[in-house]
Structure formats: structure tokens, C-alpha cells
Amino acid sequence: MEHATFVIGSWVLTAGSLIAYAVWIIRRGRALSKHATNEEMPWT
Amino acid sequence: MSTHSGTGTKATRGLGIIVLLMLIALAFFGLVFSAEDVVQGSTVRIMYVHVPAIWVAYLAFGLTAVCSAVYLSGKNRSLAWDRVAGASGEIGVLFVAVSLVTGSLWGRLTWGTYWVWDARLTSTAFLFITYIGYLAVRRLGGTHRQRARRSSVLALLAIVEIPLVHFSVNMWRSLHQSASVADPNAKVQLDGLMLFSLFLGLFAFTLLFVWLVLHRQRTLQLEDAFADRGLDAAIAARREEAVK
């Protein structure tokens, strides 16, 4: 593939940033929910 | 304390698996199966993440504005609208950043430079900065209602930028290409797999956005609940001190 560094780099940067954000959200949710009551989590 | 862990439910877990499978399929179609472009060559493969990223950013900022308008309209003053607006705005900023970076890499290969002060690029950068400002305003002090009111007003002002960004290529002379696939008069002929990869990307990124908003607004709900709890505890402590 021509310009593989740029093409793959674009995909890696995209995937990396989206995965990092998703992981941060999930981890933050888990950390907060440990101290939450059932009333504070209506989705459960 | 809750017996449930995290912000997920059976539905979000199912959606998450679908999104993951679609993103894996997108990687195969975008990087392996689809053909190279006659003019752009392999650099067209950057478009399969660049275009969906800016689409989701538009969608996210649109949702932020709609939720803000509902909150301000007074019909439903639930803070849930504000939290969805905040979650959507934050995710929109992430997707604009992705769009700017991938567009910059594409520009280096196609135009020979990472950045030009072109109408589309400049207006997109301005959009990015505006919504960083929106997120900063959300973090200013005050009650949840004060936060909701001021950030809702800002979201309704900021949304005006979306048509400015989108139509900037038509309003000013621009290096960035104008609408091609979405324009019926453009007569752009795309190979079937290229078109499929592009729409797969749009659909996958949209579902990813939904998944992220669901989780993020629940996290924000917990943050608000904890802030309220802290405030309640502080008021109770003051009352106890006053009694003593």
C-alpha cells in the first residue's frame, strides 16, 4: 500500500483515541458506581 | 451501596458488541477489500474514518443544541437533558479532533501540507475551539441548574457554526473539496465497495456515538449525584456546628 504510514497512522490514531475515551468512560462509571446507591443508578 | 457495577446494561452491552463487530468490518473493508481511488490512490482509505468522524461531530453538536433547547424551553426542566447535551458535546469535540488530525494527514499527502488557512479547515478549527469553550463553561462553579442554563444558551449560539463549516466550501474559494457523494449534481462515480465502506463507517460511527452518549450521560448523572451528596453532607455538618 502506498503511503501506508499515513493511512495506517490515521486509522491507528482514530482507533486509539476512541478506544482510550471509551475505556476512560467505562472505568470512571465503574469507579463511581461502587459508591452509588441503587436510587442513584436508575438504569439498573 | 449499589449491587450493580458500572454504567452498562444488557442493551448497551449488546450495542457495544454490534459496534465492535461493525468497526472490525469497517477496518477490513476500508483497508483491505475496497479498491484504491483512481486519483487519490490509497489515501482515499483515510476518508473512511475522516468523513464519519466529522459527520458524528455534526450529529453530536446537533443533539447538544436540541437537548439544550428542550431544557431552556421550560416544558421539561429535567437535568437529564443537560447531561445528554454535555455528554454529546464532549464526544463531539473528540470526533472533531479525530477529523482534524486525519484530515491533516490526508492533506499532507494530497496538498503537500498538513495545514492551510482554508475556509473549511479554519472554520472547523474554530468549531473545535468553540466547543472546548462549551466544555469549559460546563465546569464553571455553581449549581447544576446554573450550569445547565448557561451551557444551554452557549450550545444554541455555537450550533450556528455548523452550517458555516459545512457550506464554507461553497461560500468561499476553498482548497477543500465540496460535497461529492451527498451532492446529486456532482456526478461522482464511486466503486460499490468504496461507497459501502463509506456508509459502513458512517453507520458504525453513529452507533458508537450512541453507545458513548449512553455511558457518558450516566457517568455525568453519578457525578451530579455525588456532588449533591457532598453538598448535603456539608449543609448537615454546618447545621450540626450551629446546634453545638
Image (spheres, coloured by chain):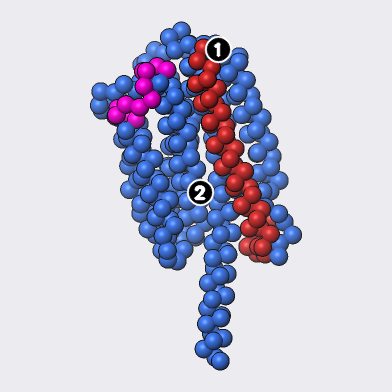
Chain colours: A red, B blue
State the image coordinates of residue B95 (x, y, percent, origin top left). Answer: 48, 37
Relative to B109, A36 lies left or right:
right
Circle 2 sits on which residue? B87
Mark 2 closeness class: few <14, some 14–19, many ≥20 residues within 10 Å: many
Q: Amino acid at mark 1?
A: Met
Q: Chain of mark 1?
A: A
Cα separation, mark 1 vs mark 2, equals 38 Å
Tell me the quadrant of the picture where the N terminus of chain B can be found.
Answer: bottom right
Q: Amino acid at mark 2?
A: Ala
Mark 1 closeness class: few <14, some 14–19, many ≥20 residues within 10 Å: few
Residue at image coords 43%, 26%: B103
- Examine the rendering and report whether any part of residue B192 can be seen: no
Q: Nearer the viewer, residue B164 or B36?
A: B36
Q: Name the disc covering residue A13, or none.
A: none
Mark 2, secondary structure of its residue: helix
Relative to B66, B8 lies left or right:
right
- Judged by depth in the image, the label closer to the viewer, 1 or 2, is 1
Q: Nearer the viewer, residue B231 or A16?
A: A16
Main SS class of the magenta portion in the image: loop
User: Can you say whether B65 is above or below B144 in the image?
Assistant: above
Residue at image coords 59%, 47%: A25
Residue at image coords 36%, 22%: B113
State the image coordinates of residue B97 (x, y, percent, origin top left). Answer: 45, 36
> Which residues fall within the magenta stretch?
B109-121
Q: Are marks 1 and 2 in contact (CB under 8 Å)?
A: no
Residue at image coords 56%, 80%: B236
Mark 1, secondary structure of its residue: loop
* Residue ranking furthest to the left: B172
Q: Name the disc covering residue A1, or none.
A: 1
- Is B117 within the magenta? yes
